[in-house]
Amino acid sequence: MLFNRKTILVLSLGALLQPAFASTADSAFCDSPWLKSGQVLNGRVSENMADFQINVMSVDYKSPTQCTAKLNLRLNLPNQVMAPNTHGLLTLSVNDKEAKLNGNLDSPTASMPFF
């Protein structure tokens, strides 16, 4: 089964963000320990489909439920099903219980907006 780059990115970031939402009820997303400037997060999409690294470049913290973060994403597809070594700058915006990602992904062969 082939996935496009956007699907793999969504799966990767979903795997990363899920523990933050699954933490205790009184814990707010913007207070998550990984959402701090300078943090580096590494992960893998199941079955060695893709490896990812997310560098938290900066966080503009307004409250436990409102913040904006600049993220540098590197996504490597070991089997090179599609373009390997995709990377991009993304902005994560959190407003209460809603999180949005915006930015562009670049690969050796193409540039792809991510909304």
Image: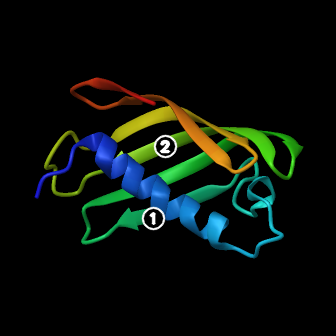
Mark 1 or mark 2: whose residue is earlier in sequence? 1
Which residue is drawn at the image coordinates 22% and 43% (left, top)? 4
Choose top left, top right, bottom left or bottom right for residue 12.
Answer: bottom left
Choose top left, top right, bottom left or bottom right for residue 6.
Answer: top left
Q: Secondary structure at mark 1?
A: strand
> Is residue 73 or residue 68 the one in the foreground?
68
Horizontal side, residue 83 vs residue 44: left or right: left
Q: Amino acid at mark 2?
A: Leu
Mark yes or no: residue 73 visible.
yes
Q: Name the residue carrying label 2.
A: 73
Choose top left, top right, bottom left or bottom right for residue 39.
Answer: bottom right
User: Mark 2 packing: few (<14 Cα in 10 Å), some, or many (20+)?
Assistant: many
- Residue 43, label in figure: 1
Horizontal side, residue 21 vs residue 76: left or right: right
List x then y, in percent, for residue 85: 31, 42
List x then y, in percent, for residue 79: 16, 57
Total number of numbered discs in the rendering: 2
Which residue is drawn at the image coordinates 34% and 39% (left, top)? 86
What colouring method underlies this structural image? rainbow
Vertical side of 73 occupied by 104: above or below? above
Q: Amino acid at mark 1?
A: Gly
Q: Quadrant of the N terminus?
A: bottom left
